[in-house]
Image: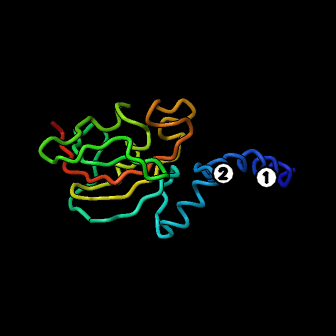
Amino acid sequence: MFCRIVFLVTLLLLPGTLHAQREKLPPEDLAWVEKNFPDAQKSNTGIRYLVIEKGHGETAQRGQMVSLVYVGRLIDGETFDQQLDPAKPFTFRLGRGKVIQGWDQIIRLMSPGDKWLVIIPPELAYGTRGQPPKIPANATLVFTMQLLSANQE
C-alpha cells in the first residue's frame, strides 16, 4: 500500500517537474543562441544572458525605480527599439507589469552598473500577438542592457 501511494505521488509531481524544465525558446532560436552564445547562462524562467560588464551593489528589487539604457533587436539583428542616452534613461517601477515579463524578471538579477546581453523567449516578451509592425508574433528578443540605478524613490 505504501509503495502504491509513493508511486501515485511521484506520478502527480513528475509533470510539474518536467514543466519547470521545458525549453521556452523555439528550436531554431535555441540553435542560434547555442551557436552564437554558447556560454550564456540560463535563468530559472528560461531567459538566457551573458554578463558583459559587472556592476556593484545589491540586485534590483521589486518596487524600486530602475533606470537603464538598452538596444532591443530581433534574432536577425534588426533593431526595433533603443534608449542609449544615460542622461535620459528608460525608467520604470520594477515588478509592476509596466514592461515585458522578461524584463521584470531579469532586471531583478542585475546590480547597478551591470551590462548584460539578454535573450528573452517569446512567451516572456510579446508572445503570439507580437508588437506590430516592429516585432512579429512569437519573436525571441535580444537586448543589450545596462542597469544604471535601482532606487526606492
Mark 2, secondary structure of its residue: helix
Residue 17's mark? 2
Which amino acid, by three-letter code, is at mark 1? Answer: Val
Amino acid at dot 2: Thr
Q: CA distance from mark 1 to mark 2?
A: 16 Å
Which x, y percent locates residue 122? Answer: 53, 42
Point out the frontmost of discs 1 and 2. Answer: 2
Q: Nearer the viewer, residue 45 or 142?
A: 142
In this rendering, the answer to whether 13 lies above or below 31 is above
Q: Position of residue 137 (x, y in %)?
A: 55, 35
Q: Is residue 89 above or below residue 38?
A: above
Residue 44 position, x and y percent, is: 50, 53
Which residue shows up at 66% across the image and 47% down it? 19
N-terminal of the two: label 1 or label 2?
1
Say which residue label 1 marks. 6
Residue at screen point 18% across, 39% down? 152
Residue that appears at 55% across and 60% down: 32
